[in-house]
Amino acid sequence: MSLLVVGSLHLDVVLCAPHLPRLDETVSGSSVDYVFGGKGGNQAISAARMGAKVYFAGRAGSDPFGDMICKTLAESDVDASQLQRDVGPSGMSAAIMDANGEYGAVIVSAANLNIIAHNIIMPKGTSLVILQNEIPQEVNLTLANKAKAAGVEVWLNAAPARKLPKQLVETVDLFIVNRVEAEFYACLIPEKKVLTTLGGRGVYYNGVMHEGFPVDTVSTHGAGDMFVGALAGQVVSGTTMVDSIRFAQAAAALHVSYQLEQRKDLTPQSVKTFLRNQESL
């Protein structure tokens, strides 16, 4: 079985600095990296890197950033044949990462706001659709309805937090949120299946706390997307949810412990080796 990710594409400009700037403060940074990003793109590539068959649908601009985004997708194992191109700028974010690996970011959605949902088809063999809140509400609702009509499960990584229409809430099978988003949606999704990520502490799901793996953190940038992609990849392969959560936690732990240029080397085998080593401790 396969999964379809419909979501955002950004070119992330990652600035390294000793600390995040305060109001009116200018901080001298040490480096800059241009990193493929956007929750949709990150989750699709993460799932594919972890061995899943992945389709992606989204929209990139006609600018050089859009060309870089398309090149990255083309070099991945993701089927991006439903990638749309916009006349104008691509989505981007500017992230500042401090000496402890924590970061803050500003996102400009641009082309992501112009996704044509009705042009997106459900690939044959799709068993799961993943959506996020970095694309327009109507796109998520249209794709969720298409998925339900085809008998396909729907996950919503409901980040960033925003008001959700009742019809979308009713259609989603699993909400994935962090602690801030969990509080925001507390009254809206109490009767729904929810998975809450708690950073290094772990994951709370179905009344159970799944403790995280202690690792030395280089950067938390993209860790949540690695978790979601790895989790989805395991689930569509037939792995139980509990085992999928453990695998995804291990993938995210390795992700945050790697330098940016090392993350492309993260494989299912390296995750399994990490898990075996953890079990032997």
Image (cartoon, grey):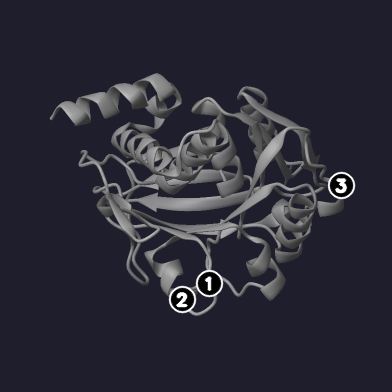
Report whether 258 appears left or right of 230.
left
Q: CA distance from mark 3 to mark 1?
A: 29 Å
Q: Give the Cα separation between the discs numbered 2 and 3.
A: 33 Å
Element on which disc 3 rests: helix
Where is mark 3, residue-wise? Answer: 119
The answer to whether residue 269 is above or below residue 219 is: above
* Residue 246 x/y as whole percent: 35, 39
The crowd level at tag 3 (other Cα within 10 Å; few <14, some 14-19, many 20+) is few
Disc ID at residue 186: 2
> Given contact means CB atoms under 8 Å apart, are the residues at marks 2 and 3 in contact?
no
Q: Of the residues tagged 2 and 3, which is closer to the observer?
A: 2
Q: Is disc 3 in contact with disc 1, using a CB cutoff of under 8 Å?
A: no
- Quick one: 190 or 7, which is closer to the camera? 190
Q: Is residue 237 visible?
A: yes
Q: Amino acid at mark 2?
A: Ala
Looking at the rendered structure, the secondary structure element under dot 2 is loop
Kind of residue indicated by mark 3: Asn
**Residue 77 sits in quarter:** top right
Look at the image and tell me in which quarter the N terminus lies: top right
Mark 1, residue position = 189
